[in-house]
Image: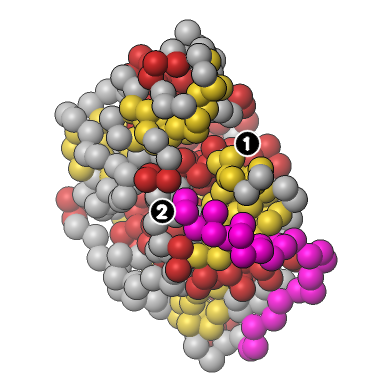
């Protein structure tokens, strides 16, 4: 059952006919959708393209993703269709080489989408204040393998100390979760009018911190997975009063009538509402505006709290370069006992961020060096820039690949002596090392498939 007060408020806000249609839609099964990786992905069978997402597809039924090696290899991200609209929102914006801040990034659907948009020359800072959720975010970033995302665990106010530092700042704000009512029973149980009010206050605070971090002329994106005006339009109205004339209209975002998206405006913001009875997707609200070019001042960065990245010596660099396709475009650094690779264009930005913020993952983890040879980190297998000629490949059939992902014992006859790249239908899954008649399965224990 839907919360009674929610139903009453929706009927009041939308009217009897629209409100009843929405409530009825919330009692139906949600569609299943995913977004394929531009470099790794393949169009799934028996599917329908999401009209506002060039890499998004609806599936006819929900498969058991856990038993699909392509899922574990980062070939696609299981992402709700409505939330993929952020790609359409930025379709006419050239983000190549730009810096994007995703202030509330877990579990990573939008962050990985931004990473594909900015390319290897750009950088995405994916922040999440909750440590457990941040670890899930980092796992998804590793699998996506673009090497241009930095994952942080910070309060928004701390990240915002990089004032005027980002070309795009996105706030996918924690909300009362009304748009998730048909996907998660706990969302219904936890909903209350009091929580709606509390969320709206926090959302306003997050927008103001995001504004500090946004460059003059940059884009501010605000989104929630809820329906009520309190957390959506009213939050934007209050923010616009606070920011005054600095909030201006961004580029014009057009929508086909057949998509069923309800478009509107709030001051300088263009708004887009997704209702399950109108669109094939979950409840979602998203808005975009620009920070006036004459707003803000000189970019500022907080003082470094620590020295994080140690320079790599020549011999170590030679070994690390052997593992990547474009070594001339990359720099390497040592953090603790692990080597990391970064694209040169953003190396200085990564250094400043890493020295001031709590970073739990960045670039691509290359691995550790022993006697001048690299023991590759599992994340390196997912890296789009991996040089597969650096080591032998062990192609496995699906059942063998699943055994690898379960960290089961594997037959030595499937592997070449030494380190191997484990693949399934061309998809890289990780590494394994054959030593004589036995095989060391190097798939991370924390990520292994637990079901039989």
Residue 203 appears in the rendering: no
Residue 351 appears in the rendering: yes
Disc 1 packing (10 Å; few <14; some 14–19; many ≥20)? some
Q: Position of residue 343 (x, y in %)?
A: 50, 65
Disc 2 packing (10 Å; few <14; some 14–19; many ≥20)? some
Tell me the element at label 1: loop
Q: How is the image coloured?
A: secondary structure
Q: Quadrant of residue 265?
A: bottom left
**CA separation in Å, label 1 and label 2:** 47 Å
Residue 9 against residue 72 in the figure, above or below = below
Query: Would residue 28 be found to the left or right of residue 97 on screen?
Result: left
* Figure disc tally: 2
Q: Residue 385: which numbered mark, if any? A: 2
* Residue designated by label 1: 192
Residue 362 against residue 97 in the figure, above or below = above
139 falls in the magenta region: no
The structure residue drawn at horizontal position 30% and vertical position 65%, both measured from the top left corner, is 91
**In the rendered structure, which segment of residues is drawn in magenta?**
297-323
The structure residue drawn at horizontal position 50% and vertical position 14%, both measured from the top left corner, is 437
Which of 13/82 is in front? Answer: 82
Q: Position of residue 271 (x, y in %)?
A: 39, 62
The structure residue drawn at horizontal position 53% and vertical position 83%, both measured from the top left corner, is 216
Q: Position of residue 232 (x, y in %)?
A: 51, 56
Query: Would residue 32 be found to the left or right of residue 204 on screen?
Result: left
Q: Position of residue 325 (x, y in %)?
A: 39, 56
Which of 126/378 is in front? Answer: 378
The structure residue drawn at horizontal position 52% and vertical position 27%, both measured from the top left corner, is 433
Q: Residue furthest right?
A: 305
Whichever of callouts 1 and 2 sits on the residue coming sooner in the sequence is 1
Tell me the element at label 2: loop
Which of 218/137 is in front? Answer: 137
Q: Nearer the viewer, mark 1 or mark 2?
A: 2
């Amino acid at each position: 059952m839907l919360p009674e007060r929610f139903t009453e408020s929706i009927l009041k806000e939308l009217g009897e006919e629209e409100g009843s249609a929405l409530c009825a839609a919330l009692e139906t099964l949600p569609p299943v959708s995913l977004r394929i990786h531009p470099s790794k992905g393949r169009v799934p069978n028996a599917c329908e393209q999401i009209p506002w997402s060039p890499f998004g597809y609806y599936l006819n039924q929900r498969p058991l993703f856990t038993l699909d090696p392509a899922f574990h290899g980062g070939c696609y991200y299981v992402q709700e269709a409505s939330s993929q609209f952020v790609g359409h929102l930025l379709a006419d914006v050239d983000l190549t080489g730009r810096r994007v801040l995703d202030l509330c990034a877990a579990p990573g659907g939008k962050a990985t989408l931004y990473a594909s948009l900015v390319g290897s020359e750009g950088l995405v800072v994916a922040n999440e204040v909750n440590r457990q959720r941040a670890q899930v975010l980092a796992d998804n970033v590793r699998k996506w393998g673009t090497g241009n995302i930095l994952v942080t665990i910070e309060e928004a106010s701390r990240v915002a100390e990089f004032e005027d530092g980002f070309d795009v700042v996105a706030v996918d704000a924690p909300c009362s979760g009304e748009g998730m009512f048909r996907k998660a029973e706990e969302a219904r149980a936890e909903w209350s009018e009091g929580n709606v009010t509390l969320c709206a206050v926090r959302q306003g605070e997050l927008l103001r911190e995001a504004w500090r971090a946004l460059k003059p002329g940059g884009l501010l994106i605000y989104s929630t997975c809820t329906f009520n005006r309190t957390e959506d339009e009213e939050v934007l109205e209050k923010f616009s009063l606070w920011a005054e004339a600095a909030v201006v209209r961004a580029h014009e975002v057009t929508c086909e009538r057949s998509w069923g998206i309800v478009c509107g405006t709030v001051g300088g913001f263009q708004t887009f509402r997704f209702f399950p009875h109108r669109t094939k997707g979950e409840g979602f609200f998203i808005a975009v505006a620009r920070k006036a070019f004459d707003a803000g001042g000189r970019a500022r960065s907080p003082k470094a709290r620590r020295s994080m990245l140690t320079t790599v010596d020549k011999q170590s660099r030679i070994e690390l370069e052997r593992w990547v396709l474009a070594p001339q475009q990359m720099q390497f650094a040592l953090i603790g006992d692990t080597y990391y690779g970064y694209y040169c264009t953003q190396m200085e930005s990564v250094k400043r961020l890493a020295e001031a913020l709590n970073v739990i993952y960045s670039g691509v983890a290359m691995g550790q060096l022993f006697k001048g040879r690299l023991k590759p980190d599992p994340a390196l297998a997912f890296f789009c820039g991996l040089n597969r000629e650096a080591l032998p490949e062990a192609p496995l059939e699906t059942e063998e690949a699943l055994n690898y992902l379960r960290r089961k014992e594997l037959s030595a006859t499937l592997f070449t002596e030494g380190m191997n790249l484990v693949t399934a239908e061309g998809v890289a899954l990780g590494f394994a090392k054959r030593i004589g008649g036995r095989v060391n399965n190097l798939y991370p224990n924390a990520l292994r498939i637990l079901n039989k």
